[in-house]
Amino acid sequence: MTTCREALDLILDSVAPLPPRATTLFDALGLVLADRLGSPETVPPFTNSAMDGYAVRAEDCAGAGSDTSVSLDVLSDLPAGSVATEAVRPGTAIRIMTGAPIPAGADSVVPVEATTSEGSRVRIAAPVKRGANVRLAGEDLREGEELLPKGFVLNPASLGILASVGLSEVPVHPRARVAILTTGDELVAAGDKPGPGQIRDSNIHTMCAQALAFGAVPVPISRVPDTREAVTAALSRARNTADVIVTNGGISVGDYDFIKAVLADLGAREVFWKVKQKPGGPLGFWLLDGKPVFGIPGNTVAAMVCMEEYVRPALRKLMGHANLLRPEATAVFEGSFRKTVQDGKVHLVRVRARRENGRLVVAPSGPQGSGILSSMLRSNALALVPADALALKTGDEVRVHLVEEPEDH
C-alpha cells in the first residue's frame, strides 16, 4: 500500500502545466503568467496634473501668503482629455482638472483649495514648489521595462497595470476543467426527499465547491447509476470534456463498484491503488489518455480530505503555480485522540487551530467518523497522526496542514 508522501509524489510527477492560452483581463484574475511581460508603453504617457487646481509658474507664486496673495490672469479651462491651446506665460494660469496634460510654460499646480476665483482672475494664497502636484511622464512605468515575471499570479493591481499599457489579453495557464462524478443508486438530488435506503448527494456540492475554491472549473456529472453502462458513459463524457477526472464512490471491489473495471476497459494506466491513511484510504490514481483520474471514496469527509490533500496540489501544478502545498507547521495538541487499532496508517484528524502565547495549538473539531461532515465544517487544519503512533494527548506535538492558509503563506 502506498504512503501519503509516495502517493502525492506519484501524482505530481504525473502532471504538467496546461498549455498556455491568451485570456482576456476580465477572465485572468488568479491565473499564472506563462511568459514574462515587458511594457510596450510609458505610463503616464504625458506629464499631467495630480489634482484639480491651476497650472502656474512656481516663480509667479513665490510671494504668495495669507497676507500677501498673488493674483493671476486665468487664460482658459483645461479638462481631462483635452490639450491646452496656449502656453502659461508670466502672470497667468490655466484652470486644470486632474489627469489633464500640464500646459507648456507651467511647472506646478496650485490646489483649488488654496485659491479664490475672481472672475477672469485667480487669487493664490500660498506659495507652491516647482513640480508640486505634477505627475511626470514615465514616473510609473518605462517602455521596455519588465511589467511582470513569468509565473506571476495575476491580482487586481497587475490587471490594472496591464490595461494601462494596452495589453487586453495575457498568456496564462488556463483554469483546469475538473469533471466530478458521484456514483450510486442510493443518491438523490439535494432538493429531493430520499426514499428508503436513499441519501442526498451532498458530495457533488462539497467537491465542486472545493474545485471552484481551488481556482479550477468544476464540471459536475452527478448521481451516476451503479451500472457498467452508465459508468462507462459518464467516464467517456468526462474524458472528452475535462482536463482532470474525479470519481466519487464505486471505487471498491463490490458487485456494484464499476469504476476500476471501466477505467481498465478504457485503457487507463493505474499509478497506485490505496493509500496508508485514514480517512481516504481507498484512493486510486490513473492516467487516461494522459489525463489524471482520481478515484475517491464516497464517505463525505474522506472525499473532502482527498480533494484537499491530493487533487488541490495537482490542480495547482496543472494551472502553472510554483507553490503547490499548504503550509505545514508543528502544533501543540489539546484534548485526546486514539486510533482503534495500531493500523500503520497516517490519520488525518480534523482540528481547530489557534495561536496562543506565541504557539500554535490544535484541538479536535468534533467526532472523527468519516461521515461526520459537521466536524469538517468546524475545522481549519488537519493534524497528521503518524503511522507508528497510537494516540495523542494534551501537550503532544503534532504536524498539521493549515488548510485555510494559502500555499505561499
Image: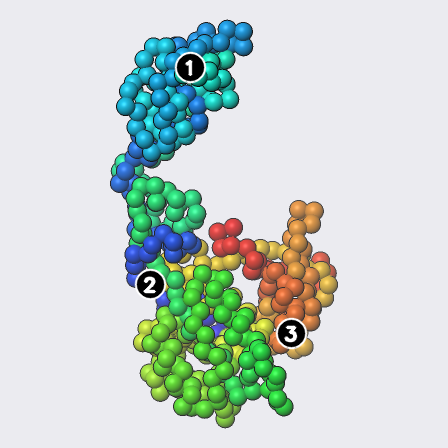
Q: CA distance from mark 1 to mark 2?
A: 64 Å
Residue type at mark 1: give it.
Arg
The answer to which of 400 and 297 lies nearer the viewer is: 297
Decide: is 338 above or below 172. below
Q: Residue at x 70, y 47 (%)?
A: 357
> What is the secondary structure assignment of the residue under circle 3?
loop
Q: How many marks?
A: 3
Q: Residue at x 48, y 79 (%)?
A: 222
Classed neighbour count for the residue bearing mark 2: other residues with Cα under 10 Å, few (<14), some (14–19), many (≥20): some
Mark 1 or 2: in front is 1
Q: CA distance from mark 3 to mark 1?
A: 77 Å
Residue type at mark 3: give it.
Ile
Spot occupied by residue 353 in the image (x, y as percentages of width and height): 65, 57
Q: Residue at x 69, y 50 (%)?
A: 356
Spot occupied by residue 331 in the image (x, y as percentages of width and height): 63, 56
Decide: is 122 above or below 63. below
Q: Residue furthest bottom?
A: 255
For residue 121, which numbered disc appears in the image? 1
The answer to which of 316 and 339 lies nearer the viewer is: 316
> What is the secondary structure assignment of the residue under circle 1?
strand
Spot occupied by residue 314 in the image (x, y as percentages of width and height): 42, 65
Q: Earlier in the sequence, mark 3 or mark 2?
A: 2
Mark 3 or 1: in front is 1
Classed neighbour count for the residue bearing mark 3: other residues with Cα under 10 Å, few (<14), some (14–19), many (≥20): some
Which residue in the protein does label 3 denote?
A: 372
For residue 160, which numbered disc appears in the image? none
For residue 18, which numbered disc appears in the image? 2
Q: Earlier in the sequence, mark 3 or mark 1?
A: 1
Visible in this render: residue 65? Answer: yes
Residue type at mark 2: give it.
Leu
